[in-house]
Amino acid sequence: MKRIHNKEDIIQVGLDLVLSRGFNATGVEAILKQANVPKGSFYNFFSSKEEFGLAIIDKFVAGRAEVLSPIFSDESIPPLERVKKSFDTMIAIFGSDDCSKGCLIGNLGQEMADQFENVRQRLNQALQSWTKELSKLLLQAQKENTIPADTNVDMLAENLISSFQGALLLSKIKKSPEPLRNFIHLYFDIFLAQRTEN
């Protein structure tokens, strides 16, 4: 008997395709062909391509959380080092495909934020959640005098994410991890380098 594919199969295949091609360039037919499922299967699970878009965002965010949560919660590592390690880990993942795919959140933000309000809101929620996790670690670092006391940690967290997304975009254009390495060097070796007390 033919294997019955479930919703998760279609979401995973669709996520991979959208990361490679973009959302608008990825048709339902291509997703179903890649997943090797009948045409009707897509609309059994999703009422629209927009709903599918929300599902792949959730899948991507859940996958990222699975990777980053152990880093964020590892109290054996100083908080600022955990922030750096989280970015190093994502750079290793994004760099493994010759920097060709980038981050789904950044990609869809550029492509779809003005097309589907529900998608824009879901992307914003994902970014806010990421910002919150980084802010908590930066606040701990601030309490340990690793970063200046007058630093706005929420603003810094958001700026780290913005700079990282920009470096990802440059890496895609250059087909090189150099902008990502520069991001790490500038922020963690220079801007946020630990200060010694006089």
Image (cartoon, rainbow, N blue to C red):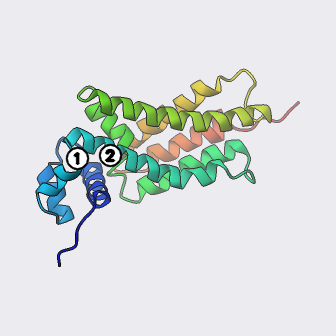
Q: Residue at x 44, y 33 (%)?
A: 125
In primary-sequence order, the first of circles 2 and 1 is 1
Query: Which x, y percent locates residue 185?
Result: 58, 43
Q: How far apart in space, not on screen, are marks 2 and 1 (Cα)?
A: 9 Å
**Residues at circles 2 and 1 in contact by the CB criterion of under 8 Å:** yes
**Residue 101 numbered mark, or none:** none
Look at label 2 and name its amino acid: Ala
- Residue 115 occupies which quadrant of the picture? top left
Question: Image quadrant for the C terminus?
Answer: top right
Decide which of 55, 94 is in the foreground and name it: 55
Q: Residues within 10 Å of mark 2 (few under 14, many from 20)?
A: many
**Residue at 42% over, 35% down:** 166
Query: Foreground: 117 or 96?
Result: 117
Q: Dot 1: what SS?
A: loop
Q: Secondary structure at mark 2?
A: helix
Find disc 1 in the rendering and name its residue: 46
